[in-house]
Image (tube, rainbow, N blue to C red):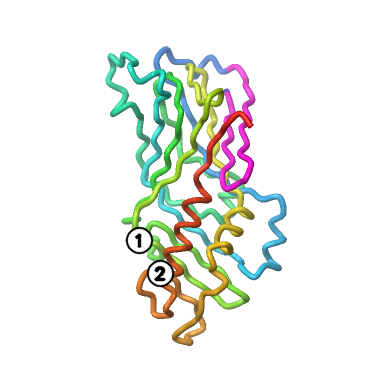
Amino acid sequence: MKRMIFAILTLVAVFFITSCNDDSAMDKEKTGVQLIIRTFTDDFKSQSNSQLVIDKFLMNIDKIEFELDDDWDDFDDPNNFFDDDEITIYGPFLIDLMSPEAFDGIKLGNVFIPNAVYEEIEVDIDISKDQSVPEIYNKSLYITGTINETPFIFWYDDDFDFEIEFDDGKYLELDGESVELMIQFYLPRLIDAMIDSGILNAKDGNGNGIIEIWEDDPDGNDDLADDIIDAIEDALDVEFDDD
């Protein structure tokens, strides 16, 4: 089995592969892929002394798309695996990036993807229709924690996506040998992006003891909400290059 780790939310992207033989998983046309989402940090305790502390980060992953490399655009696909030069894994996958399970690695499941060379992985986030988790119902993102020790709630109710893009010389090649593909979220970079967006300036406008941040929120932080989601989207995109 190959293990492929994609670390996002970092200034320097990480690409790591280990291999082992697993002939039982071999397939002439497809590769068995185990998808894993994981949160990681090099100093988790440091956030306890920060002005911004995150205790819940719910994200609803609607689908994950694998896009073919340009050299494969004219690939003859007799089995009709591809739709517009991409293969799509459908969710939804509701993830709490701050949960113990996320720090251990959440297995989204095993899928079979056609053998090919892929230049990009796109992760689409969309609103949740899971009423069993009311916090994020009809929302795509839901974050709670404290700002200067005052509780806050931030949520977003629209779709967005982020991309893991491979430059020349770096790509995802599936050749029939089973793969463990892990997408890692680097917590300190995520917190830095939110701080840079100005979240520390959010206010408890109605004085109810909770800083509320979303479109048309009762605290008057709606303009700031746009800046926060833009910062999160920018931080999530990553490109693997030769540098």
**Quadrant location, the N terminus:** top right
Q: What element carries label 1?
A: loop
Q: What's the residue type where badge 2 is placed? A: Trp
Q: Name the residue under label 2.
A: 214
Q: Give the range drawn in magenta.
A: 2-21
Identify which residue is drawn at 30% across, 16% down: 77
Question: Mark 2, residues whose alpha carbon is within 10 Å: few (<14), some, or many (≥20)?
Answer: many
Q: Does the magenta segment cover residue 225? A: no
Above or below, 182 relative to 53: above
- Mark 1 crowd level (few <14, some 14–19, many ≥20, 10 Å Cα): some
Marks 1 and 2 in Cβ contact (< 8 Å): yes
Q: Magenta part mainly helix, strand or loop?
A: strand
Q: Is residue 84 left or right of residue 56?
A: left
Residue assigned mark 1? 157
Is the residue 173 above or below the residue 146 in the image? above
Residue 10 on image: x %, y %: 61, 46
165 relative position to 125: left or right: right
Looking at the rendered structure, the secondary structure element under dot 2 is loop
Question: Residue drawn at (42%, 30%), measured in percent from left and top?
Answer: 111
Residue 46 in picture, x, y percent from top left: 72, 61
Question: In the rendering, at what x and y percent does residue 230 appear?
Answer: 45, 57
Percent position (x, y) of residue 79?
A: 28, 17
